[in-house]
Image (spheres, rainbow, N blue to C red):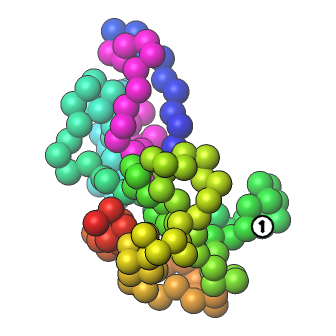
Amino acid sequence: MPFIIRWPGVVKAGSRFKPMIQNIDYAPTFLEIAGLMIPPEIQGRSFVSILKGQIPDDWRKSVYYHYYEFPQPHRVAPHRGVRTEQYKLVHYYRTDEWECFDLKTDPQEMRSVYADPSYAEKARHSSRNWPGWKSNTRCRRWHRNRIHSIANTIVG
């Protein structure tokens, strides 16, 4: 998720960070910046250490996302996905269609490699191991380690 911040004395102008953050990380980050306690039940993690140039060893290597509002506001077909630095695996659960993008060779996501024989093992193995995803299944709360195992299958 793109994130722009100006924090003089902490974040150098023009800095770019590779670790993946999500909007669930905003609240704990802003609470830490404000010097307030982060409630243990809050979702997400503070990324203040990343902004200071220190990447935690256990920082996520993948993110899960879900687009479910259709047709408004973005006109994006409902789907769930897992993204790593190099790959993005997408499941359109209403039509049971899959896409897989190699973000290094196709950063604009113009050509799915899901059916490409050279990617077949990663893409198909990953989709088979994507548990409980049927067109009539409601979104379940996912355990972080399960998401990482799916993403690691994609990355190999």
How would you rate the neighbour count of disc 1 (Cα within 10 Å): few for under 14, some for 14-19, many for 20 or more? few
Image-quadrant location for residue 112: bottom right
For this rendering, which residue is in front, 133 or 108?
108
Residue type (three-letter) at the residue carrying disc 1:
Phe
The residue at which mark 1 appears reads as: 70
Check the image and report above or below for 103 versus 56: below
Q: Is residue 86 magenta?
A: no
Specify whether 147 is left or right of 68.
Answer: left
**In this orientation, does residue 148 appear?**
no
**In this orientation, does residue 33 appear?**
yes
Q: Position of residue 143 (x, y in %)?
A: 34, 72
Q: Position of residue 37 (x, y in %)?
A: 30, 39
The residue sitting at 61% across, 46% down in the picture is 108
Q: Position of residue 94 (x, y in %)?
A: 69, 82
Question: SS at mark 1?
Answer: loop
The residue sitting at 64% across, 75% down in the picture is 92
Check the image and report above or below for 82 versus 26: below
Magenta segment = 10-30
